[in-house]
Amino acid sequence: MAPRSFSSLAVLIVLVAAASTRGASGCPASDRAALLAFRSALSEPYLGIFSSWKGDDCCSRWYGVSCDPSTGRVADISLRGESEDPILARAGRSSGLMSGHISPAICRLDRLTTLILADWKQISEPIPPCLTSLPFLRILDLVGNRLSGPIPADIGRLSRLTVFNVADNQISGRIPASLSALSSLMHLDISNNQISGPIPSDLGKLRMLSRALLARNHISGGIPDSIGHMTRLADLDLAENRLTGEIPASLGSMPVLSSLYLDSNRLSGRIPATLLASRGLGILNLSRNAIEGEIPDVFSTRSYYTALDLSHNRLQGSVPRTLVTAAYVGHLDLSHNHLCGAIPVGSPFDHLEAASFANNDCLCGGPLPACK
Ligand SMILES: *[C@@H]1O[C@H](CO)[C@@H](O)[C@H](O)[C@H]1NC(C)=O
């Protein structure tokens, strides 16, 4: 019996020691102090979400904060200003408002895995660069605020980061070269900011990436060929930027690409035939560029487009005949080009409206007036 009671005593000592480093109950005093400093840089007047941030037990009673049960350290901060959250419903509001800035004190929470501070509309000032020193960070979601300044230059240090979302802010500067080092990244959303400069040429190194959303910025330069070598990328949105050059043919050999938005850029050259023929691509928007040449006539029974928008370009030649073999074409827009000749007969052309073909050089046949 003696050895056994000795070992339970040892376990007890370990537990007591662990509890004392955490304070009598709740989180370590240093984590609590960091949270209070983080809170003091923010102001949230309507919901009172910070009114629960008092007392010692930041791990169980503080709204939006949770801890890792094995370490007792603060692991998650999750505060959303737009959600089905009961706190919003109770206050009779559909969205929240928070101003202030993200205090660098948050970087003292060195076991943080999740930081969500989303849709508060008025949190401003730059993203603290020290966030890149949080080695366990997996989710960084700061969407829908008024953050300014650049993406931290050494963002690539966050080797566990799977979600990086800073969309709908006022972020400026370039995409840091180190972004391509985020080897765990699955979801990248920097849309709707003021980001300029080129896309890093080795972005294709992000082998886990499934969504890359970079739309509505001032991004210039070409679309890197390396993107076409991303085997898990399903959604690529580069719309409304200042991209130039040709569409890399490599984009046509991406195994799971399902939506591609390149509209409202300054792209030129021809449409790669492999891209139009690519199986699994359901949405393709190339509208409002300077794309020229003929539309490759490469559709097949494997083509299934919910939307195919090639409008407002410099396309020539005729409407591809193989479109009638496509399994499905929902929305088709070929307007504002230089197409000519008879529109083929059959599906999908029998359910499309004249607007899909408007403002070309000399198209004719239903839904346009009959050819002479
Ligand atoms: C394609 O992009 C253009 C220009 O950005 C936009 O006006 C149009 O609605 C988009 N088409 C589809 C089908 O989403």
Image: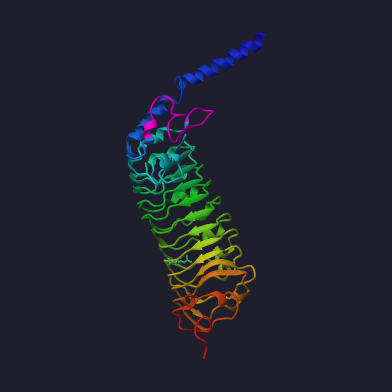
Please indicate whether residue 68 sits to the left or right of residue 129 in the image. right
Task: Work out which residue is located at the far right of the displayed protein and give it.
Answer: 1
Confirm whether residue 59 shows in the render.
Answer: no
Please indicate whether residue 1 sits to the left or right of residue 156 in the image. right
Quarter of the image for the N terminus: give it: top right
Residue 274, horizontal then vertical, whole percent: 58, 68
Number of dots carrying numbers: 0
Q: Residue at x 53, y 61 (%)?
A: 259
Residue 72, horizontal then vertical, whole percent: 49, 27
Confirm whether residue 103 shows in the render.
Answer: yes
Q: Is residue 55 magenta?
A: yes
Residue nearest the viewer, comparing 335 with 16: 335
Q: How is the image coloured?
A: rainbow
Q: Residue at x 47, y 19 (%)?
A: 20
> Quick check: 200 above or below 325?
above
Q: Residue at x 40, y 35 (%)?
A: 107
Name the image quarter holding residue 56.
top left
Residue nearest the viewer, comparing 197 with 75: 75
Q: Is residue 74 magenta?
A: no
Q: Residue at x 45, y 69 (%)?
A: 287
Which residues fall within the magenta stretch? 50-73
Residue 149, horizontal then vertical, whole percent: 34, 48
Q: Quarter of the picture for ligand 1?
A: bottom left
Residue 322, horizontal then vertical, whole percent: 61, 76
Q: Main secondary structure of the magenta part?
A: loop
